[in-house]
């Protein structure tokens, strides 16, 4: 799938790239291929493929 290959390209350059920023970067490429996908559909696709970024836990400093 074109979207998943584009996601892997962007994530290789910027590893902790979130879904909303990823969508912002993907929009020009998706328009070239006439793909219409919103934030929620992209989120569901990434969740189904196991590509969501898990939040890191940073404990407070003492």
Image (tube, grey):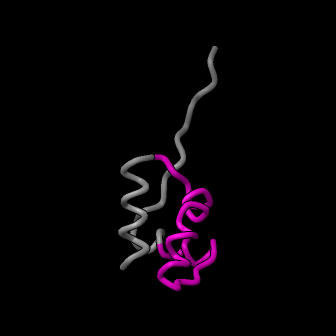
Image x and y of residue 38, in percent: 63, 77
State which quarter of the image contains the C terminus: top right
Residue nearer the viewer, 15 or 30: 30
Q: Which residues are magenta?
A: 16-45
Residue 5 vs 10, above or below: the answer is below
- Name the quadrant containing residue 19: bottom right
Kindly report the secondary structure that dominates the magenta region of the rendered protein.
Answer: helix
State which quarter of the image contains the N terminus: bottom left
Residue nearer the viewer, 44 or 62: 44
Q: Residue furthest top?
A: 62
Does residue 24 belong to the magenta stretch? yes
Image x and y of residue 17, in percent: 51, 51
> Seen in the image, is 28 located left or right of residue 48?
right
Please name the residue shown 58% across and 80% down the image.
37
Residue nearer the viewer, 30 or 32: 32
Please name the residue shown 56% across and 69% down the image.
28
Please name the residue shown 63% across and 24% down the image.
60
Residue 34 vs 18, above or below: the answer is below
> Seen in the image, is 1 located left or right of residue 57?
left
């Amino acid at each position: 799938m074109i979207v998943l290959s584009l996601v892997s390209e962007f994530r290789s350059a910027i590893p902790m790239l979130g879904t909303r920023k990823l969508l912002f970067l993907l929009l020009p490429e998706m328009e070239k291929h006439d793909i219409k996908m919103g934030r929620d559909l992209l989120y569901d696709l990434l969740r189904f493929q196991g590509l969501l970024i898990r939040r890191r836990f940073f404990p407070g400093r003492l």
